[in-house]
Amino acid sequence: MTKLAYLHEPGVLYNLACRFSLKEIYTYTGNILIAVNPFQRLPHLYDVHMMEQYKGAAFGELSPHLFAVADTSYRYIH
């Protein structure tokens, strides 16, 4: 979503729909994480391997994810 030329409702909705169809439920708008409810379990998003990938990574270096926000927040306060 950060790569959209214009942030307007049709563009946002289209972007979210495309990502949803790819089971990419997270996207950023700046440093804000947007999550779309996938209405199904996606256990690969929350396993230890995924968590380790985001640990210490610069924000925005990897695909949008809750772990990126959590790790950045943790490092900011410590």
Image: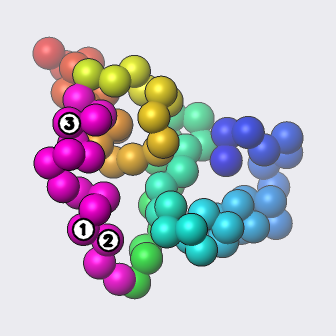
Q: Earlier in the sequence, mark 3 or mark 1?
A: 1
46 shown above or below 78: below
Going by the image, does 50 lie left or right of 19? left
Q: Position of residue 40 (x, y in %)?
A: 35, 83
Secondary-structure class at tag 3: helix
Q: Nearer the viewer, residue 57 or 1?
A: 57
Amino acid under label 1?
Pro
| Disc 3 crowd, CA 10 A, few/some/many (<14, 14-19, 20+) | few
Residue name at image x 45 percent, y 34 percent: 62
Residue drawn 54% across the image and 51% down it: 27
Magenta stretch encompasses residue 51: yes
Residue at 43% x, 76% y: name it: 38
- Which residue, given by chain and number where applicable, does mark 3 sit on? 52
Which one is earlier in the sequence, the residue at label 3 or at label 2? Answer: 2
Q: Quick one: SS at disc 1?
A: helix
Amino acid type at circle 3 is: Glu
Query: In x, y percent, where is residue 77?
Result: 19, 19
